[in-house]
Amino acid sequence: MQTANLRGVCMDPGMYITYRALVEALIPYTPVISLSEAVQVPGAVANGVYDYLIWELDHSLSLVCCISPEAIPLSAPTAQLLNIAAVQYTSAGYSDCGPWSPGWAWSPFAALATEDRIRVLSLLEQRQLDCGLFPPPYKEDAGFTSYMVDFLNRATLFGNYSEWPAYGTTRLNTPLCRRLEFFPVGWRQAEYPGVSKGHRAFRGYMLYIEREGACYTIV
C-alpha cells in the first residue's frame, strides 16, 4: 500500500506534472470569486485531485489483458496520450508552444496554455487526432481514447467535489483504510451535513395483503 509521500517519490515527475496541468485546466483556482460563499474557490490542484486521478487509473480503471493475468495500470500511458496529443496539436499550428517552451521536455501538455489544454482534450474526444501515434492501449483505438477523455473529466469533478480530499494523508490508501481528517469542502458547498449513524435504512414500502378464501391480493 502506497502513501501520498511515497507516491510522490516513486512517480515519474513528467507524469505528475501532466496530471497537475490537467486538473488545473478543468477546475482552476478562482480567487476572483472569493467573496462569494456559494462557489468553491480552491481549484483541483489545491485539493490534490491529480493524485486521485492517478490512483483511479492504476486501481479502479486498470485493464486486464488475455496475455497477462495482472492488471495493467493506465496512469502512465494516459499521461503519454495527453503529451503526444499536445505535440500533434502544436505541430498542426494550433499553438505557438514548442520544444523551446519552458517545461516542454518534462510535459508538452503542461507547457500549453490552459485554453490549449482544453482544446487538446476536445480534439481527442472528437477523434480528430492521429490515434496511430498514441501509446497502447490507445493506439488505433479512437473509441477508447474518447471514453478516457470523458472519464478524466468526470473523475476530476468527482475527486474535487467528493469527500476524497478530506481523507488527507490517508487518501492514497485502499478505501477501507481511508479516514476523514477534516470536513470536506465539497460537502460544505452542497450543504451536506455529513454522515449520521443510526438512521433507519429504507427497506421498501409497506404492503398489505387482502385474503379472500384461498386467494390473496397484495395492495
Image (tube, grey):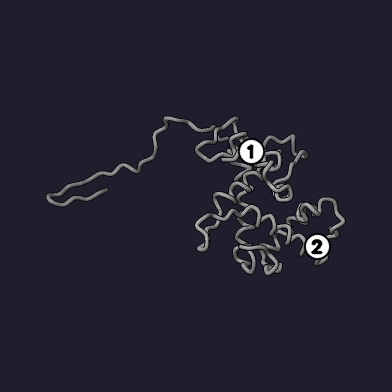
The answer to which of 149 and 177 lies nearer the viewer is: 177
Residue 62 in percent (x, y) is at 56, 54
Q: Which residue, as the protein is rendered here, is positioned at the far left?
A: 213
Residue 16 in percent (x, y) is at 71, 47
Q: Quadrant of residue 2?
A: top right
Question: How far is mark 2 from mark 1, CA to CA?
Answer: 33 Å
Note whether residue 188 is visible.
no
Q: Secondary structure at mark 1?
A: helix
In this rendering, position of residue 140 left or right of residue 30 = left
**Sequence order check: which comes first, mark 2 or mark 1?**
1
Residue 13 in percent (x, y) is at 73, 47
Look at discs 2 and 1 and give the one toward the viewer.
1
In the rendered image, the vertical position of residue 30 relative to residue 199, given as above or below? below
Note whether residue 136 is visible.
yes
The answer to which of 176 and 113 lies nearer the viewer is: 176
Residue 160 in percent (x, y) is at 63, 43
Question: For mark 2, what is the residue?
Answer: 90
Q: Quadrant of residue 34?
A: top right
Residue under the point 71% across and 36% down: 36
Q: Residues within 10 Å of mark 2 (few under 14, many from 20)?
A: many
Kind of residue indicated by mark 2:
Thr
Kind of residue indicated by mark 1:
Ala
Residue under the point 63% across and 35% down: 185
Q: Residues within 10 Å of mark 1 (few under 14, many from 20)?
A: some
Q: Secondary structure at mark 2?
A: helix
Residue 114: mark in rendering: none
Q: Which residue, as the protein is rendered here, is positioned at the far right?
A: 100
The answer to which of 27 and 82 lies nearer the viewer is: 82
In this rendering, position of residue 111 left or right of residue 174 = right
In the rendered image, the vertical position of residue 171 relative to residue 215, given as above or below? above
Question: For mark 1, what is the residue?
Answer: 4
